Structures are given as structure tokens and as C-alpha cells.
Image (cartoon, helix red, strand yellow):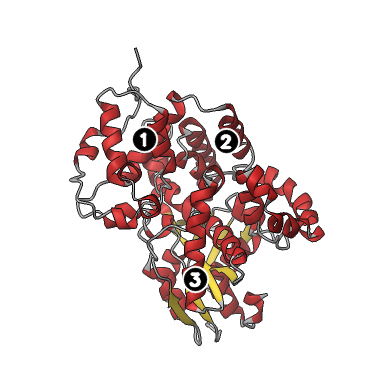
């Protein structure tokens, strides 16, 4: 006899499932429903499957496939008039899947490779040298144009295409003193991919915060926040990362904990929920989460003191899903950009629709991720903007790769890099290089 799909440890809440009235407002915002038009690949369809599983239905491969196809973008949470917490439901479901479903050998190896690498900054740092040499050789362009890798190993091809051109390894000091009178003290989360593949974003974050009067503490001992693990159902791994980050940053006794990566930020703000059952960390985690702010949030809460110099360029702003939908941070990045003299902000069509990056999704589900990336790239190109701006490293890599494929490459930057260039009085060319 088949065992029930879910065990007794934190299954998706029946009460939360009952909040869904199956109205369909989520459908046009769900990337997989937009691509395929299949009910079971929509939020309400997956909620139906979760309900069946709670009632004892077995966890079939078909059911898992529908759960795996979800990008976890949370656009449905924004669209839902009934306040359904689909984010909580899919995270609880994915943890059940990871515990109770036996994946194929190939899938297990791929997932283990991902989670043995991406949450570890030192391991990512070790990849910088080989990746720089590979990029300098020009081999990547020939491989992409041939299409051989995409046919033989789609997941590897997705990683290869999205790999950013590596910047100079600009490290953030452990202590950055404020410029002028001190406004407060912030602890900065350095991230993993952000720290090693986009170090300029962290450096710009520290400079802007210092220019606005904050002392910036960036403890070197900090590791992964656990976001990738949370979003993939690797519960114990995620909790261990969360505990370690709290231990690393808590001694700073900062007024705020600042993050500049959307996916990481949404998880950091959930620490109180994630560790609610841990008597040693529950209270500490809740206090930690209460201090977390995205870089755009903290900068729009204060009256700026640093001068914004003109940047005469056109910018297309892309909403990272875990910033706009999971954290509700939409107006703040736009307000920061609009406050820069000479800058023209252009909106992207279908702004609510995910670009297909979604953490590990573009590696584990390369075909739909590519379709979504190409769709987003088309809308970005239509704006005619000189620069694409977003707030998540995965989005930057995904959309840049799609724009390159389409033959319409556009420079990309994080919101904070644009603001940093304005404050420092850098030329527009510094962002378009």
C-alpha cells in the first residue's frame, strides 16, 4: 500500500489551503501557467494537489513534477485577493518532497553538486580563476554558438551561459567608517554568489551607506543565509545556515541588518518563523529578522545627505520577484533611481512575471527558464534603455544571458551601483562598460 504523501512534520497548513477560493486571479501572473496553460501548473492547481496529499494521496512522480515546476516567484501572493500564503505552502511542500520522494540518480547528483558549491563562498572563490581563464579563452562563445552543450547537458549549458564576466575581486572591509556624523550602525550580509561573482555590488553598498552616515560592519566569518536551501526544501541545511549567520552577525549589535540580494532578503526576514521551534534560537532569530532591511528600504527611510550628481542615461528597472512579491519592496528602488538627476526610468512590460532565474530553477529546469528569460529579454529590449537595473544576482545573470542570445546585449547593474556612481560623480560610461 502506498504511503501518504506527507508526514507529520510541518506539512502545509490545511487552514492555509482552505483560504484559496480558486478564483483564478493568480493565473495570469503565474509563469508556468502563462507558458503551458495547465491547471495543475498554476498556484490553485498545486494547492489542489497539496490538499489531496494532506488527505492521504500518495506522492507520485506526476505530483512532484508539478511542485518542482513552480518557480516560487510569489507573484500569486501579490495577485491573490484572499491573502493566500502560497509562499508558506510551497516551502512546506518542498520540504516534504525532499524527505519523502526518491529522485532519479541524475537529479540527486545535480542537486548535490549545486548545494555543495553555491552556498559556500570559499568554494565559489576557488572557481574564479578557472572561470576567468575559460572566459578569456573565448571557448564559451564557440560552445554556445554550436548548441552542442545545450543538447547534451541543458543544465550545464544554462550555468555556462549565465556565468557573469567576472569583476575585479573588490572586498568589503570589516569596518567602514561613516562619512560625516554617524547616523547609526549596520551589519551587512555579504551573500555567496553576490560576494564572489558580483563583488562590486557589495563594495558599492558599503560606500553608499557610509556616504549616508552609517558605520558598516561586515564580519568576514559570515557564510550563507540558507535562502537556496529554504526554497529547495532542504530544511535542516537551511536552519543550520541560519543559525550560523545569526551567530556571526549578532555580536555586531547593529541597528539594522542590510541585504542587497532579493532572494536572501526574503529568507532573512523569515528567520523568526524558520527557527520558531528551536528553543535556543527562536527569540534570537525573531530579533534578528526584525532588523533586516533591503538596501533600498533603508535608504528611502532617511533624508539623504550625500549629493546625487547627474547621470544622463535611460534605465529599465526589473523587479526581482523576491524583492517585489516576497518583500513588497517595489517603489523604493524606483524612488532612489528617480532621485538621480538626468536619469530616465523606463518600465518593463509584464513586470510581474518572473525572468526564470528563481535561485536554482534555471539549472534544474533549464527549458522553461530559458523561455521565461527570452520573454523577459524581449520586453527589456523593447524599452530601448541603455542600462538594465535589478536587485538580485540571479536575475542579472539570467536576463543578461537571454539578451545576449537575442543579439540585443544591454549593460546590467544593481540599483546600488547606479546610486554609487551618482554619489561619486562617475561618468555614465562606468556603468555601460
Q: Is residue 141 left or right of residue 34?
A: right
**Inter-mark Cα distance, 1 to 3:** 34 Å
Q: Nearer the viewer, residue 133 or 312?
A: 133
Answer yes or no: do the residues labelled 1 and 3 have beta carbons within 8 Å? no
Which residue appears at 19% of the width and 43% of the height?
19
Q: Nearer the viewer, residue 312 or 73?
A: 73
Q: Which residue is mark 3?
A: 380
Q: Nearer the N terminus, badge 2 or badge 1?
A: 1
Which residue appears at 50% of the width and 39% of the height?
229
**Residue 195 location, x and y as percent?**
63, 54
* Disc assigned to residue 111: 2
**Inter-mark Cα distance, 2 to 3:** 31 Å
Q: Nearer the N terminus, badge 2 or badge 3?
A: 2
Q: Alpha-carbon neighbours of circle 3 within 10 Å: few (<14), some, or many (≥20)?
A: many
Task: Establish if 248 lies above or below 314.
Answer: above
**Residue 381 location, x and y as percent?**
52, 73
Task: Establish if 96 lies above or below 39.
Answer: above
Q: Nearer the N terminus, badge 1 or badge 3?
A: 1
**Inter-mark Cα distance, 2 to 1:** 19 Å
For the residue labelled by badge 3, is the local secondary structure a helix, a strand or a loop?
Answer: helix
Task: Establish if 61 lies above or below 410.
Answer: above
Q: Alpha-carbon neighbours of circle 1 within 10 Å: few (<14), some, or many (≥20)?
A: many
Q: Which residue is mark 1?
A: 92
Quarter occupied by residue 205: bottom right
**Residue 334 location, x and y as percent?**
42, 73
The answer to whether one can see residue 133 in this image is yes
Which tag is nearer the camera, tag 1 or tag 3? 3
Amino acid at each position: 500500500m502506498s504511503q501518504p504523501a506527507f508526514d507529520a512534520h510541518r506539512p502545509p497548513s490545511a487552514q492555509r489551503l482552505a483560504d484559496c477560493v480558486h478564483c483564478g486571479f493568480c493565473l495570469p501572473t503565474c509563469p508556468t501557467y502563462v507558458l503551458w496553460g495547465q491547471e495543475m501548473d498554476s498556484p490553485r492547481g498545486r494547492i489542489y494537489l497539496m490538499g489531496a496529499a494532506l488527505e492521504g494521496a500518495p506522492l507520485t512522480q506526476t505530483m512532484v513534477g508539478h511542485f518542482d515546476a513552480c518557480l516560487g516567484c510569489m507573484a500569486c501572493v501579490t495577485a491573490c485577493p484572499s491573502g493566500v500564503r502560497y509562499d508558506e505552502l510551497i516551502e512546506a511542500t518542498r520540504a516534504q518532497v525532499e524527505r519523502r520522494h526518491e529522485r532519479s540518480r541524475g537529479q540527486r547528483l545535480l542537486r548535490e553538486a549545486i548545494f555543495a558549491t553555491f552556498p559556500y563562498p570559499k568554494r565559489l572563490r576557488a572557481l574564479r580563476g578557472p572561470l576567468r581563464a575559460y572566459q578569456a579563452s573565448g571557448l564559451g562563445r564557440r560552445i554556445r554558438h554550436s548548441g552542442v552543450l545545450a543538447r547534451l547537458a541543458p543544465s550545464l549549458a544554462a550555468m555556462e551561459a549565465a556565468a557573469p564576466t567576472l569583476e575585479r575581486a573588490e572586498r568589503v572591509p570589516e569596518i567602514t567608517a561613516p562619512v560625516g556624523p554617524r547616523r547609526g550602525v549596520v551589519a551587512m550580509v555579504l551573500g555567496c554568489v553576490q560576494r564572489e561573482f558580483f563583488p562590486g555590488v557589495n563594495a558599492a553598498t558599503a560606500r553608499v551607506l557610509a556616504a549616508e552616515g552609517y558605520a558598516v560592519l561586515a564580519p568576514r566569518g559570515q557564510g550563507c543565509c540558507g535562502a537556496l536551501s529554504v526554497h529547495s526544501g532542504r530544511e535542516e541545511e537551511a536552519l543550520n545556515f541560519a543559525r550560523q549567520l545569526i551567530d556571526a552577525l549578532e555580536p555586531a549589535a547593529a541597528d539594522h541588518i542590510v541585504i542587497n540580494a532579493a532572494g536572501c532578503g526574503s529568507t532573512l526576514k523569515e528567520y523568526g518563523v524558520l527557527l520558531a521551534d528551536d528553543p535556543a534560537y527562536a527569540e534570537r532569530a525573531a530579533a534578528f529578522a526584525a532588523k533586516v532591511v533591503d538596501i533600498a528600504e533603508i535608504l528611502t527611510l532617511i533624508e539623504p545627505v550625500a549629493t546625487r550628481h547627474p547621470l544622463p542615461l535611460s534605465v529599465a528597472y526589473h523587479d526581482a520577484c523576491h524583492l517585489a512579491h516576497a518583500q513588497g519592496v517595489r517603489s523604493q528602488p524606483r524612488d532612489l533611481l528617480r532621485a538621480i538627476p538626468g536619469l530616465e526610468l523606463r518600465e518593463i512590460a509584464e513586470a510581474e512575471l518572473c525572468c526564470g532565474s528563481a535561485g536554482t530553477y534555471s539549472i534544474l529546469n533549464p527549458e522553461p527558464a530559458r523561455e521565461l528569460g527570452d520573454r523577459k529579454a524581449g520586453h527589456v529590449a523593447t524599452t530601448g534603455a541603455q542600462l538594465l537595473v535589478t536587485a538580485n544576482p540571479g536575475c542579472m545573470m539570467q536576463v543578461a544571458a537571454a539578451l545576449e542570445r537575442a543579439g540585443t546585449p544591454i549593460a546590467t547593474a544593481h540599483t546600488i551601483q547606479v546610486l554609487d556612481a551618482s554619489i561619486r560623480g562617475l561618468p555614465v560610461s562606468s556603468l555601460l562598460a
